[in-house]
Image: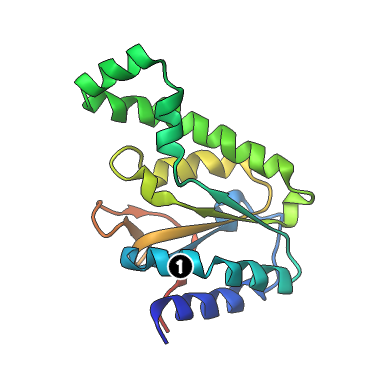
Amino acid sequence: MNRIDHLVKNYRSHIRMPLRPGLPASQRVWFAVYPAAEERRLLNRMDEFEMATKDAGHPWARIELKGSLARWLASVDEEEREEWFKHPGDIELYAQTEWKDLLTEFFQKEVARASSPESTVFALTGLMDLYDFLHVSELIEGLEKSFPGFLLVFFPGEKEGNTYRFLDARTGWNYLAAPILSEK
């Protein structure tokens, strides 16, 4: 079995357990942790996660962040964007506020579209777009306040203890999400 096979299998076991919607948001966040090199393979198997969720009797909503950085930069006034590119460090500063707010708004709109959001599994994919501009921890902490269901974060990286490392490169952060790992 490859790593994504293990992740799908472990997710199937996890989603079959009774879900408790009344839990605090931090306890309704799940991290599907897999090696970053497996991103393409994971995306090609996303339908298996959706089917497992629906087979367990829960609605599924995928929220894709891929391309959101380009869309955000394209939405910025051309003169302002040119100034940012003269000083690339400024892009990260604006990303930590403006882009993060835009992503949170996008997420909230997607949540509002769900027919029964309290029992929906919101699958967050495309986190690689955040690299170098926004920390996953900052985004997740912002989203925690805005979703009524369950947040399944597809996390390219690794987990050691309660510490998650994004793309195996950034220093980790301690988070108490329920891990779903890509190993036995």
Q: How many residues crowd mark 1 within 10 Å: few (<14), some (14–19), many (20+)?
A: many
Left or right of residue 132: residue 11: right
In the rendered view, tell whether residue 177 sits above or below residue 106: below
Q: Quadrant of residue 121?
A: bottom right
> In the image, what residue occupies the spot 67% across and 53% down?
149
Q: How many marks?
A: 1
Q: Is residue 147 above or below residue 19?
A: above
Residue visible at 67% across and 76% down? 16
From the viewer's perspective, is 40 left or right of 13?
left
How is the rendered protein coloured? rainbow
Image coords of residue 73 (percent x, y): 39, 28
Q: Position of residue 38 (x, y in %)?
A: 36, 68
The residue sitting at the bottom extreme is: 1
Residue at the disc numbered 1: 42
Q: How far across and down, in percent of the image, does residue 81 sit?
A: 33, 19
Q: Residue at x 62, y 51 (%)?
A: 24
The C terminus, quarter of image: bottom left
Q: Nearer the viewer, residue 40 or 52?
A: 40
The reply to whether residue 160 is in sight is: no
Q: Amino acid at mark 1?
A: Leu
Residue 83, quarter of the rendered image: top left
Q: Can residue 44 be seen at all in this image of the molecule? A: yes
Give me the residue at 55% from left, 52% from top.
Answer: 26
State which quarter of the image contains the N terminus: bottom left
SS at circle 1: helix
Q: Quadrant of residue 152?
A: bottom right
Judge left or right: residue 81 versus residue 153. Answer: left
- Relative to residue 80, is residue 96 depicted above or below? below
Position in image of residue 59 (x %, y %): 73, 60
